[in-house]
Image (cartoon, grey):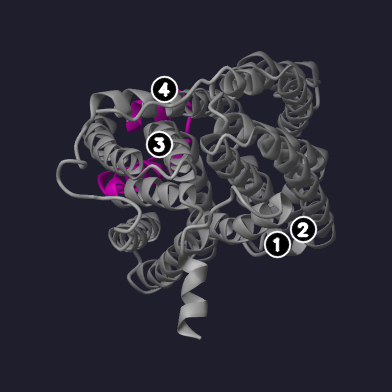
Amino acid sequence: MAGSFKRFFEPVDMTEGKPAGKIFNFMVPMLIGNIAQQLYNTVDSIIVGRFVGDKALAAVGSAGPILNLFLMLFVGISVGAGIMVSQAFGAKNRESLSVAVGTSISLTMVAVVIIMVTTPFMIMPLLRLTGTPESIIHWTWQYLMILFVGIIGCAFYNILSGILRGLGDSLSALVYLLIATAINTVLDYIFVRYFHMGVSGAAVATIIAQAVSAILSYRKLMQMKQLFDLSGRYLKLHRGPAGELLRLGLPSGVTQAVFSMSMLIIQALTNSFGEQYIAANVIVMRVDGFVMMPAFSFGQAMTTFAGQNAGAGKLDRIRQGNKEGTMIGVATSVVIAFLIWLFGKGLMSVFTDTAALVDMSYHMMMILMPGYIAMEVTQCLSGTMRGAGDTMTPMWISLINTIALRIPLAYGLVALSKTAALPKGNCYMLQYSLMITWLLGAAITFACFRAGRWNRMLRSGVKKTFEN
């Protein structure tokens, strides 16, 4: 019995067996894990909204775009590490796998130092730049400062869990995240409800929980000595592998950075509609994060699936897996969107007792609904391209969506909606602009996937180098 249970926590070879089954079984723990990850900020929002007030809820939400902007370094390293690890694992190359894991850990430490040194000087200027209301700006600053000082736990969990997923082990990362989520929830409640620490208590709870998940993930990797070596000679910056990791990961990091910058620009527009709209937008973002989880989870699963099969040279299997995975993903998103339509107002009321906020946030979610299915298509196809080694195409698509579509649409639609009764414009235009962007983004991604740059790269023998 113990041996049968243990096998669920072992790396999964996705180069054999039915693609749909492998993808789905790998994706489910990751989906639950992504939902648990979303609970970090959601729990913060629920508890401060309930026990501190709507202004505290708005403060926590206003921190999101700035936090995501500085996390782009870790996004890049995590994506690059996942691709390198999955390809080395698929190729059954122990030396390459050891170098990939060790280099990922070393790069993460460098990124942590950069973030901890630079962010304290930049938070307040960015809050001022985005027009954060004076009534919440100090709380937002406190929340961000604590998170960035304790960023090491968040950074290493994300990178180490990415390595585990690259090895096909999505279940271990899930278990550690669930443990951390439980710790975060309990500490949030204690710090905010009983210690009266406000938004600072929510931030402290988060960094403690993230540190626990990072320690557990590292401990798991140390137990995988049959697959790779984590001795001192691998835990350093190997020039070639580090460059390859950044080549693979930086496009995703740049995408995240540009997306976060666009969110700061949009946040300035959001802030112009006042505290009630900011608070409603926070609620939408929290629920939206859960609705989007199937798309992100299938996208990550497709990256690992494509990466392992690219390493094994099984190109036809990549195409088959992409088709089956995308179909399952779209069906999943349709079901979840339907459930949100049915039970959405109940979910909104978890965050606040203010009826106007519940109604406003529910209306915003209904506007976004068609875009969720489109995002499923985008994430699955982009995940396959990244796993195959083509990280540039998804980056350019995201940049086009963000710079050429999202920002102009948001400001343009708001400007066109201005009337004597609505001198600042219709706030719901922000949701319409986002929904339209998602639909157009899916169409662009499908066209680029069919164009087949990723396929040509594989067939021409483009391989990832792991030499020192």
State yes or no: residue 56 in magenta: no
Instruction: Tell me the mark number nearer the camera, choosing from 4 and 3.
Output: 4
Determine the secondary structure under disc 1.
helix
Characterize the magenta stretch by its predominant secondary structure.
helix
Query: Residue 177 appears in which quarter of the rendering?
Result: bottom left
Which residue is labeled 1 in the image?
347
Q: In whole angstroms, how far apart are the C-alphas of marks 1 and 2?
A: 5 Å
Q: Earlier in the sequence, mark 4 or mark 1?
A: 4
Q: Amino acid at mark 4?
A: Arg
Which residue is labeled 3 in the image?
71
Q: Would you say 346 lies left or right of 201 here?
A: right
Range of magenta residues: 123-152
Q: Would you say 455 lies left or right of 419 here?
A: left
Residue at image position (23%, 30%) is 238
Q: In whole angstroms, how far apart are the C-alphas of marks 3 and 1?
A: 28 Å
Instruction: Tell me the mark number nearer the camera, choosing from 3 and 1.
Output: 3
207 or 421, nearer to the observer: 207
Which disc number belongs to residue 67?
A: none
Q: Earlier in the sequence, mark 3 or mark 1?
A: 3
Q: Would you say 439 lies left or right of 389 here?
A: right
Which residue is labeled 4 in the image?
247
Q: In whole angstroms, how far apart are the C-alphas of marks 4 and 2?
A: 41 Å
Q: Earlier in the sequence, mark 4 or mark 3?
A: 3
Which residue is labeled 2 in the image?
344
> Could you classify mark 4 by the number of other residues whose Cα lies within 10 Å: few (under 14), some (14-19), or many (20 or more)?
some
Determine the secondary structure under disc 3.
loop
State yes or no: residue 140 in magenta: yes
In the displayed orientation, state which residue is furthest to the bottom.
Answer: 1
Q: In whole angstroms, how far apart are the C-alphas of marks 4 and 3?
A: 18 Å
Q: Amino acid at mark 1?
A: Leu
Instruction: Tell me the mark number nearer the camera, choosing from 4 and 1.
Output: 4
